[in-house]
Image (cartoon, rainbow, N blue to C red):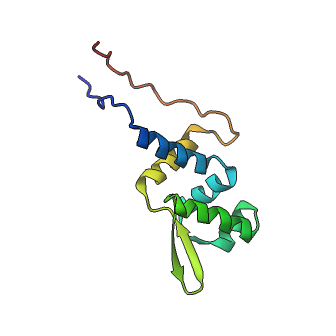
């Protein structure tokens, strides 16, 4: 006997918030910044260099990601250090890159977990 999560329909507020999060991650530069910040702690200069954008561009994107609550920053002297602390965001980033192969195609799916038929 398998147990599954009970089905529940998301609320309007959840849909709006989730769509906003996905919109923030829809820009390749922002997704790259989040992916790097999910792996460690970086200053804006390092992130800009790794992503291949100017410091001003990286700062602008990082500001948006901070306001959206996707990444966090702390001060170390004159520098801001960026990271991802939220386990849900970490899981989301891990999942998307497990789903997408390095060549950009969809990665092979893991074995399908069968859901029990719904009672109607």
Q: Residue at left 60%, top 49%?
A: 25
Position in image of residue 31 (x %, y %) = 62, 52
Q: Based on the displayed image, in which of its 4 quarters is residue 4 positioned?
A: top left
**Is residue 41 shown to the viewer in this render?**
no
Along the line of sight, the residue nearer the viewer: 4 or 62: 62
Q: Residue extending furthest left?
A: 1
Q: Is residue 2 above or below residue 44?
A: above
Q: In this view, does 84 lie above or below 28?
A: below
Q: How many callouts does the rendering have?
A: 0
Q: Residue extending furthest front?
A: 12
Q: Quadrant of the C terminus?
A: top left
Q: Is residue 80 above or below residue 12?
A: below
**Is residue 45 shown to the viewer in this render?**
yes
Q: In which quarter of the image is the N terminus?
A: top left
Position in image of residue 76 (x %, y %) = 53, 83
Q: Based on the displayed image, in which of its 4 quarters is residue 57 positioned?
A: bottom right
Q: Residue extending furthest bottom?
A: 77
Q: Residue at left 60%, top 66%?
A: 63
Position in image of residue 28 (x %, y %) = 68, 50
Q: Residue at left 50%, top 62%?
A: 84
Q: Residue at left 73%, top 70%?
A: 56
Q: Residue extending furthest top?
A: 120
Q: Based on the displayed image, in which of its 4 quarters is residue 108 positioned?
A: top right
Position in image of residue 36 (x %, y %) = 59, 60
């Amino acid at each position: 006997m398998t147990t599954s999560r009970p089905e529940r329909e998301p609320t309007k507020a959840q849909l709006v918030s989730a769509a906003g999060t996905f919109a923030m991650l829809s820009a390749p530069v922002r997704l790259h910044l989040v992916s790097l910040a999910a792996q460690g702690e970086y200053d804006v200069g390092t992130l800009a260099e790794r992503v291949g954008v100017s410091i001003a561009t990286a700062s602008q994107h990082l500001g948006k990601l901070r306001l959206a609550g996707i990444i966090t920053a702390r001060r170390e002297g004159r520098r801001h250090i960026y990271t991802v602390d939220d386990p849900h965001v970490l899981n989301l980033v891990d999942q998307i890159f497990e789903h997408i192969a390095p060549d950009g195609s969809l990665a092979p799916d893991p074995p399908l977990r069968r859901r029990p038929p719904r009672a109607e």
